[in-house]
Image (tube, rainbow, N blue to C red):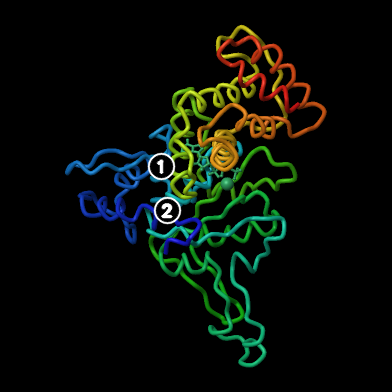
Amino acid sequence: MSDILRYHAEQLFAHELEELKKQDQEKRPHNWLLSPQSVVTYLIGGKLKNGFEVTPKYIGSRRLMEISVATLATDRALLLYGLPGTAKSWVSEHLAAGISGDSTMIIQGTAGTSEESIRYGWNYARLLAEGPSKNALVETPVMRAMQDGKLVRIEELTRIGADVQDTLITILSEKTLPIPELNSEIQATKGFNVIATANNRDKGVNELSSALKRRFNTVILPMPDSMEEEIDIVRRRVESFEKIMDLPAEKPALEEIRRIVTIFRELRNGVTLDGKTKLKSPGATLSTAEAISVVNSGLALAAYFGDGTLKAADLAAGIIGAVVKDPVQDKLVWQEYLETVVKTRDEWKDVYRACRDLV
Ligand SMILES: Nc1ncnc2c1ncn2[C@@H]1O[C@H](COP(=O)(O)OP(=O)(O)OP(=O)(O)O)[C@@H](O)[C@H]1O
Ligand SMILES: [Mg+2]
């Protein structure tokens, strides 16, 4: 068990789900592991009546989580929409874990996703030997979720071709999956629903048809509101990464995380925190997820090639890598920021030096 690189949410937080289930006094929708109220507690965190502490998974608006959970209790599916790195996949995984106790029914949407990977496929050896039969059918996660009354997750829905996306219309409106070859169908069991994610930055996406759009409630996940919220997200995620990776490094000082988050927020918003200096923004989305990665790779550098404490020099390469995605435009933006902002801050001299040496 301990060799697994990444556990599913329901494995990692099994004890929390167990405790929430025990303490749950509210009504549960059919086939739900927890009541909607408890699912929100699982997502947002909180203290149970018996003092048990539930850790927050999503840091941000409670209302957004309530809307998401309530949607999944209706006949409409849920679309989590937003910029890259705003925790859409993360929330989708935890919603599936909290509601169905199973986040593994997942389809990764790509330009190559076919109808067969949404509806069902055929095991051709069997099909040839036995003819069309239930045994020759290859079940997809959607089909299994319909049978078991669970949630199915579709990642990056808008990357799937529009014609293939529309396969979902019958599934979502009639709650049935026809199998004409067998002259039969799969009728969804209560508890079945779909959580899709899509980001609004990608090029070459396929907009949902209005028929499909009408079957989804869209919840937009925003970038973290405040600086403190963003620091909190980075700190928590970095701590759990450290545990998993077993790094021989000290916990990163909150000060380092604050600096990274400051740089990211200033460049993202195109203005310094004090509102005095206008800045150019780079083309890349500087999401919280990127800030988490920068600190994580900094920690690995510090652990293996430094003295075990995170320093500006360990972070510099990561910061530049995140900001400068385009070698010409972004580089200018970064250099300007370095010279007009970083250089002028007395307590940032180490960052300035470390970054200047790398440009
Ligand atoms: N508000 C938040 N609360 C908790 N974690 C967050 C938050 N925002 C970002 N994260 C963290 O950011 C990381 C990346 O999130 P995730 O992969 O879910 O992004 P995404 O929105 O699916 O991005 P993409 O569009 O690129 O797929 C996760 O590890 C998640 O923990
Ligand atoms: Mg994602």
Pick the quarter of the image with the C terminus: top right
Q: In this view, does 131 lie above or below 103?
A: below
Which residue occupies the extreme right position in the image? 328
Residue 166 on image: x %, y %:
63, 57
Residue 301 on image: x %, y %:
59, 39
Which residue occupies the extreme front position in the image? 307
Q: Residue 9 carries which label?
A: 2
Q: In which quarter of the image is residue 342?
A: top right
Which residue occupies the extreme left position in the image? 50
Q: Residue at x 23, y 49 (%)?
A: 26
Please tell me how crowded label 1 is: few (under 14), some (14-19), or many (20+) other residues with Cα within 10 Å. Answer: some
Which residue occupies the extreme top position in the image? 276
Q: What residue type is labelled 2?
A: Ala
Q: Does the residue labelled 1 lie within 8 Å of ligand 1?
A: yes
The residues tagged by marks 2 and 1 sit, at their Cα atoms, a distance apart of 10 Å
* Most foreground residue, 110 or 224: 224
Please tell me how crowded label 2 is: few (under 14), some (14-19), or many (20+) other residues with Cα within 10 Å. Answer: many
Marks 2,1: beta carbons within 8 A: yes
| Element type where label 1 sits in the image | loop
Q: Is residue 173 above or below residue 316?
A: below
Q: Which mark is residue 57?
A: 1
Q: Which amino acid does label 1 sit on?
A: Lys
| Element type where label 2 sits in the image | helix
Q: Residue at x 23, y 50 (%)?
A: 24
Residue 302 on image: x %, y %:
56, 37
Q: In this view, does 72 lie above or below 58?
A: below
Q: In this view, does 329 lie to the left or right of 348?
A: right
Residue 113 on image: x %, y %:
67, 61
